[in-house]
């Protein structure tokens, strides 16, 4: 069990791509494999088929026939030509006879249901292949050619704790794992993060130089990774579209909107017809030798597995449509953001410090930006910057852009006419080269002690230097096997999947009730009902006395997969078959899937919160995890963590204030960051989504139950309190009727039996509980939403919250001037996002951590107010640089000390 847990825990998506890529290559693959395993278990372990045998068949004959029909395939044959059937005479007048020719029967054979698990596995491979190509081919990039320089560093650090990994080592291990933050401490602590960012900048610089040395100038120079990534994106689009049309062909449907039509029918309570490619009832012929003669038997069989298969492929129809749209839109976004130089320059400018622009004239700055993007970053570098921003947020992107820019300006000042790439390669990267030489100590390399006295400039002009670079590229392939093996070692150190099964600390209790506890409860119900339906015995029918055991089993399986119809016992069975069909109920087969969808919808707002909150530049989850760390019981550990978290908050809030909203495509989306309300506004939006979700599900559930009154749950509770038996809702009937046809001696015989659906007893109890559960959490979510609105946008509440902790730490008094200082601290330094973050920390980590954290933030702020740093003096040509600054606190006037 421990090994299984360890294996499952190692399943985690890489971060060398964006979320849409992970949706294709990870989540879709995992879901498809799960479906394949379930269908395989039912097909090869359970009882996927049940047949109607002659009465004289014995037990072992029955078992032989079942196994034979499943492995040798069956063929589909409708019962009658008249559709729909109006009465019994339509049934017996228009039967479809079984063909006498064996060849015609074999033409109708269907055996693909045996292949469904393998087809699902093939679909998983199709979605995994693009990422496999991406990881295999991007190693030919010059950026990955540097891996052999770091193998020794990598091997050494593999033996260290995971927290000691830096970004460069992550980059080596996972190709483009520059953007993967290795640990909470490194992601939050500014000095460590800046050190790692500088290493990444050095690596990217080195790779750009090495590209020109190895391959010269050609079409792929500096854009190999970008073109490869766009090719992978195109592959994802084509893959989703091709699988969609292959699925449509496999299902045997003519219209391309089959899934939408089925969904429409389900919403309006109409029974959707079978597609024909997953028939429930089929015919099977088999031959048996007896006394030297060959006897041929034809039996009618029910394939319960096809009921499950059809629902799986209906899900995939919708999933492929969603993926095709998302992949296409994502591809257009990447193309638009990469190939246009104006977007690239604007992207870099949005992250540069103000001082970078003040050091030169406007025209010189623009020319340098264009040259920096074109010669230093190149298309591959811009792609990596955007990928890092997508996975690591604005803080890392800003520090990396400024580090690369400073290196560019430094080299340009040393040689104004031409960037000395050779110097960058030979001198700036000497620690890396030296580390490489120490771990590959042989006398064949060009940097041996014997050649140390030679002129480096002369050596670089010789062909030996180029040969050395080529030899290093060749050495990479010898070391790749080591890296691949070490990847699996590293995966064993990252047992993070279990954390996904536990609630996080970046929200409050009401959120966790919505996205964690409610989905767990619903998922438990879904699994219980699934086990009852597909493993247990969900239906029991009253069959005629002459029915054998095999006939009874066939009848119950048929009635469950082909649906039953509800009829009060006091009513007569209608003669008209159309009226019987109009009373059919088949949604109980869908209850487990509907519950699974409901669980996902409750988790969806949380997923949106996880995917978008870190775009603010504030690692909400990282700092709250540090705040609730068990090590905080120790005073020294708590002091260190508090200081680290405080530094990260200060830097994040500063970045928000300085972030340019005009330098990005769709820059209006980040105005919330500039005003310090991005996280707060996003959190309130997530709260609203929770309310919308639970209210909509409550209303849909009320309609699904078909109650004549809105407060169905209250009425049921009142009946139970007074000891009255509460009536059935009509949507979960216990007793139903079932009609089925059997071919006997070439004729069609119709049987009508009465069945008990025990599964509906569980369904009704489950939905009674869910009615009350949704009602309760809707009230709490609604009240919690308005509470957060009040405390987030009421400035007095914000000031009182901060003042309470500052008074406890004896940092302020209750005087009016002190309160004004706190008000200024809240409005100018913390702003709504900072106060929100401190509330989340106080809610999850307790008052001790919150008090010390607010105390540290106040101490640094107060010191800056007492000893302010003079702003840089702007030249006249740069006086208009901040004309677009729309900070709400820009025109604020300080109150007089004695005013009231």
Image (spheres, rainbow, N blue to C red):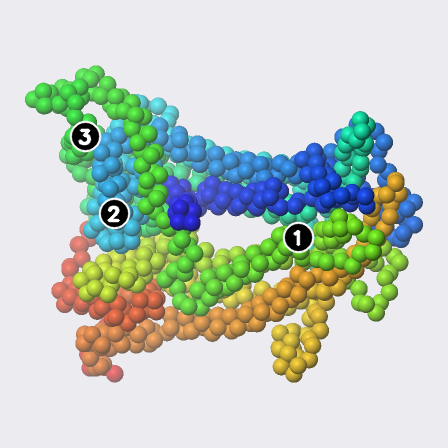
Residues packed near mark 3 inside 10 Å, few (<14), some (14 to 19) or many (20 plus)? few
**Residue 439's mark?**
3
Mark 3: which secondary structure? helix
Looking at the image, can residue 818 be seen? no
The residue where tag 2 is placed is 161
Residue 12 position within the rendered picture, expressed as x and y whole percent measured from the top left: 41, 46
Q: Which residue is mark 1?
A: 263
Mark found first going from the N terminus, 2 or 1? 2
Q: Considering only order in the chain, which callout, 1 or 3, is on the residue closer to the N terminus?
A: 1
Residue at 30%, 76% (x, y): give it.
Answer: 800
Disc 2, SS? loop
Mark 3 vs mark 1: give the one in front: 3
Q: Secondary structure at mark 1?
A: helix
Examine the rendering and report whether any part of residue 651 can be seen: yes
Q: From mark 2 to mark 3, how far is it between C-alphas?
A: 22 Å
User: Residue 13's image quarter?
Assistant: top left
Residue 479 in percent (x, y) is at 29, 28
């Amino acid at each position: 069990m421990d090994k299984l847990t360890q294996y499952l825990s190692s399943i985690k998506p890489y971060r060398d791509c964006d979320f849409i890529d992970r949706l294709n290559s990870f989540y879709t693959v995992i879901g498809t494999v799960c479906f394949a395993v379930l269908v395989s278990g039912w097909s090869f372990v359970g009882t996927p088929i049940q047949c109607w045998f002659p009465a004289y068949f014995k037990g072992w004959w029955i078992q032989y026939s079942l196994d034979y029909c499943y492995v040798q395939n069956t063929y589909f044959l409708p019962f009658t030509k008249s559709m729909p059937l109006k009465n019994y005479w339509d049934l017996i007048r228009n039967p479809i006879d079984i063909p006498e020719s064996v060849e015609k029967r074999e033409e109708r054979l269907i055996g693909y249901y045996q292949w469904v698990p393998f087809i699902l596995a093939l679909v998983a491979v199709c979605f995994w292949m693009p990422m496999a190509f991406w990881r295999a081919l991007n190693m030919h990039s010059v950026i990955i050619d540097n891996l052999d320089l770091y193998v020794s560093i990598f091997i050494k650090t593999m033996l260290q704790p995971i927290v000691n990994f830096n970004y460069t080592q992550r980059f080596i291990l996972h190709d483009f794992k520059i953007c993967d933050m290795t640990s909470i401490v490194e992601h939050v602590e500014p000095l460590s993060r800046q050190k790692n960012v500088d290493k990444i900048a050095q690596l990217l610089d080195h790779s750009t130089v090495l590209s020109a040395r190895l391959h010269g100038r050609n079409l792929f120079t500096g854009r190999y990774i970008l073109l490869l990534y766009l090719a992978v994106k195109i592959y994802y689009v084509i893959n989703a579209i091709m699988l969609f049309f292959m699925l449509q062909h496999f299902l045997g449907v003519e219209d391309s909107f089959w899934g939408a039509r089925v969904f429409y029918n389900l919403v309006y309570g109409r029974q959707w017809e079978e597609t024909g490619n997953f028939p429930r009832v089929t015919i099977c012929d088999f031959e048996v030798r007896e006394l030297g003669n060959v006897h041929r038997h034809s039996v009618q069989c029910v394939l319960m597995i096809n009921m499950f298969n059809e629902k799986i492929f209906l899900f995939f129809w919708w999933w492929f449509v969603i993926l095709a749209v998302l992949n296409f839109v994502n591809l257009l976004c990447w193309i638009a953001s990469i190939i246009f130089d104006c977007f690239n320059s604007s992207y870099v400018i949005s992250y540069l410090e103000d001082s970078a622009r003040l050091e030169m004239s406007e025209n010189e700055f623009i020319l340098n930006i264009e040259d920096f993007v074109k010669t230093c970053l190149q298309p591959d570098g811009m792609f990596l910057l955007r990928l890092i921003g997508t996975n690591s947020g604005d803080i890392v992107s800003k520090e990396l852009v400024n580090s690369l820019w400073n290196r560019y300006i430094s080299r340009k000042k040393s040689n104004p006419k031409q960037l000395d790439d050779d110097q960058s390669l030979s001198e700036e990267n000497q620690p890396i080269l030296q580390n490489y030489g120490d771990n590959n100590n042989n006398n064949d390399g060009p940097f041996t002690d014997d050649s140390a006295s030679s002129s480096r400039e002369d050596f670089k002009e010789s062909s030996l230097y180029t040969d050395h670079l080529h030899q290093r590229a060749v050495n990479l392939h010898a070391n790749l096997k080591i890296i691949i093996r070490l990847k699996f070692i590293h995966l064993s150190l990252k047992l993070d999947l279990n954390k996904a099964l536990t609630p996080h600390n970046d929200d409050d209790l009401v959120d966790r009730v919505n996205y964690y506890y409610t989905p767990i409860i619903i998922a438990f119900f879904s699994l219980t009902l699934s086990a009852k339906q597909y493993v247990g015995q969900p239906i029991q029918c009253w069959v005629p006395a002459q029915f054998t055991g095999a006939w009874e089993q066939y009848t119950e399986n048929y009635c469950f997969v082909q649906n039953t119809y509800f009829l009060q016992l006091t009513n007569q069975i209608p003669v008209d078959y159309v009226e019987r069909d109009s009373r059919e109920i088949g949604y109980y087969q869908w209850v487990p899937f509907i519950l699974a969808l409901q669980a996902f919808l409750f988790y969806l707002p949380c997923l949106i919160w996880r995917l978008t909150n870190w775009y603010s530049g504030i690692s909400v989850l990282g700092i709250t995890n540090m705040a609730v760390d068990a090590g905080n019981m120790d005073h020294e550990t708590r002091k260190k963590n508090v200081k680290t978290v405080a530094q990260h908050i200060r830097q994040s809030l500063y970045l928000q204030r300085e972030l340019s909203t005009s330098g990005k495509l769709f820059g209006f989306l980040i105005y919330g960051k500039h005003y310090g309300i991005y996280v707060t506004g996003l959190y309130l939006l997530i709260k609203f989504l929770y309310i919308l979700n639970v209210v909509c599900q409550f209303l849909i559930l009320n309609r699904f139950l078909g109650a004549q009154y809105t407060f169905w749950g209250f009425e049921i509770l009142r009946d139970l309190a007074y000891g009255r038996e509460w009536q059935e809702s009509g949507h979960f009937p216990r007793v139903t009727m079932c009609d089925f046809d059997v071919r006997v001696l070439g004729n069609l015989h119709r049987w009508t039996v009465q069945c008990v659906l025990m599964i509906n007893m569980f369904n009704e109890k489950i939905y009674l509980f869910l009615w009350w559960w949704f009602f309760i959490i809707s009230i709490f979510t609604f009240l919690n939403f308005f509470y957060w609105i009040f405390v987030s946008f009421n400035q007095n509440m914000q000031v009182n919250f901060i003042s309470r902790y500052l008074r406890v730490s004896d940092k302020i008094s209750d005087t009016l001037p002190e309160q004004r200082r706190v008000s200024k601290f809240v409005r100018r330094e913390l702003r709504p996002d900072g106060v929100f973050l401190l509330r989340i920390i106080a809610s999850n980590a307790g008052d001790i951590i919150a008090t010390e954290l607010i105390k540290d933030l106040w101490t640094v702020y107060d010191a800056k107010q007492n000893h302010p740093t003079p702003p840089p003096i702007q030249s006249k040509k740069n006086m208009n640089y901040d004309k677009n600054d729309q900070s709400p606190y820009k025109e604020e006037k300080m109150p007089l000390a004695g005013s009231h």
